[in-house]
Image (spheres, rainbow, N blue to C red):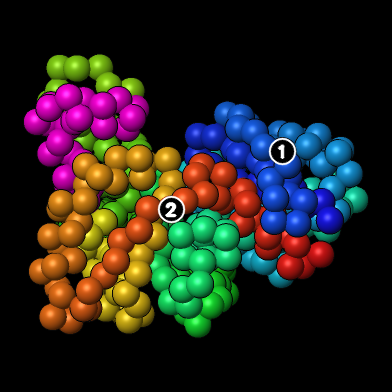
């Protein structure tokens, strides 16, 4: 059975075609400028006769109607957009609309770093910071597919303004734009991406090391809160920024260790499915509904 999975990001959109559990096609493009153009692009991929489509969005969705509810990071106005019905009308295929972090979590739970583990926290570091929770072998959903929003845990009430309207969310410290902004304020260097900041840190740049340490601290605070709340002992971290996880680990581990009397030992594992994990998970959700 052939399934198409789409992971719409704030910067890039990734896609995979699954045959069973095997990826037989994949690609990455800059995220189109609005939802209509994104649907047109996905429909062009579906022309290869897929049997179902799963699409992951970085925000809250209504799975029952396939509607985007609160999707702030991709370009264009997604809020209220009828993703499922629009895409189904263009392709004739059944469409499942899910949160991208929950899609990432499902992929890593069934096929990746968390395979065989029933209770896991997931954190996805990209343009934003997403999260998911697996308990007893299943990904928790919530009424707006909003359960597991680790990126919007408050770690500094007087911190930077977040896209959600709050201040000091994890996302403002550990998401890509937050990392770039923190490095750029007061720095004479022109740095365009988190990857360049990680490269600078590996070359010994103290400011870059400090920014990534701060990101690790923020992530550690949020994961500690989530571990206390859900009682899990394993965390899987993925997403485009997770390539710098080693530069964040010292501060992250220190924060988790500080809370060890309450939360116990927490194993922090890197995701293993790579940048296509969200798209793979979206395809798996599509398969489940198809």
Instruction: Locate residue 11 relative to residue 79 in the image: left or right.
Output: left
SS for tag 2? Answer: loop
- Give the residue at x 39% y 48%: 125
SS for tag 1? Answer: strand
Residues 12 and 36: in front is: 12
- Give the residue at x 13% y 26%: 205
CA distance for labels 1 and 2: 20 Å
Structural crowding at the residue carrying mark 1, measured as other residues with C-alpha within 10 Å and reported as few (<14), some (14–19) or many (≥20): few
Compared with 177, 100 (above or below) is below
Asked if one can make out residue 48 in the rendered structure from this viewpoint, the answer is yes
Instruction: Locate residue 18 relative to residue 131 in the image: left or right.
Output: right
Residue 218 position within the rendered picture, expressed as x and y whole percent measured from the top left: 22, 55
Residue 196 position within the rendered picture, expressed as x and y whole percent measured from the top left: 30, 25
Q: Quadrant of residue 254?
A: bottom left
Label drawn at residue 251: none
Compared with 241, 260 (above or below) is below
Residue 196 on the magenta segment:
yes
Residue 114 position within the rendered picture, expressed as x and y whole percent measured from the top left: 46, 65
Characterize the magenta stretch by its predominant secondary structure: helix
Quadrant that contains the C terminus: bottom right
Residue 40 position within the rendered picture, expressed as x and y whole percent measured from the top left: 77, 36
Residues 189 and 136: in front is: 136
Instruction: Locate residue 28 relative to residue 234 in the image: left or right.
Output: right
Q: Quadrant of residue 263?
A: bottom left
Magenta range is: 193-216
Q: Which residue is mark 1?
A: 25
Residue 137 on the magenta segment:
no
Asked if one can make out residue 82 in the rendered structure from this viewpoint, the answer is no
Residues 255 and 115: in front is: 115
Residues 230 and 145: in front is: 230
- Give the residue at x 50% y 34%: 11
Label drawn at residue 271: 2
């Amino acid at each position: 059975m052939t399934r198409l999975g789409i992971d719409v990001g704030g910067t890039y959109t990734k896609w995979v075609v699954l045959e069973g559990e095997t990826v037989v096609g994949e690609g990455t493009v800059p995220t189109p400028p609005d939802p209509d153009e994104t649907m047109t692009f996905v429909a062009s991929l579906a022309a290869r006769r897929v049997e179902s489509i799963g699409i992951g969005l970085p925000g809250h969705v209504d799975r029952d109607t396939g509607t985007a509810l609160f999707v702030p990071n991709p370009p264009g106005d997604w809020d209220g957009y009828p993703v499922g019905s629009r895409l189904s009308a263009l392709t004739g295929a059944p469409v499942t609309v899910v949160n991208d972090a929950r899609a990432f979590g499902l992929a890593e739970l069934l096929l990746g770093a968390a395979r065989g583990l029933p209770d896991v926290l997931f954190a996805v570091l990209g343009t934003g910071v997403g999260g998911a929770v697996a308990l007893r072998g299943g990904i928790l959903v919530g009424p707006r597919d909003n359960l597991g929003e680790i990126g919007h845990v408050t770690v500094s009430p007087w911190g930077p303004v977040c896209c959600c309207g709050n201040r000091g969310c994890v996302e403002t410290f550990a998401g890509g734009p937050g990392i770039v902004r923190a490095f750029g304020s007061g720095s004479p260097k022109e740095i365009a991406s988190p990857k360049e900041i990680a490269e600078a840190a590996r070359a010994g740049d103290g400011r870059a090391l400090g920014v990534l340490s701060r990101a690790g601290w923020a992530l550690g605070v949020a994961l500690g809160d989530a571990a206390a709340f859900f009682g899990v002992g394993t965390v899987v971290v993925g997403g485009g920024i997770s390539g710098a996880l080693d530069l964040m680990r010292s501060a992250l581990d220190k924060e988790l260790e500080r809370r060890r009397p309450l939360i116990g030992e927490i194993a922090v594992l890197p995701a293993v499915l790579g940048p296509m994990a969200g798209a793979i998970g979206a395809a798996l959700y599509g398969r489940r509904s198809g």
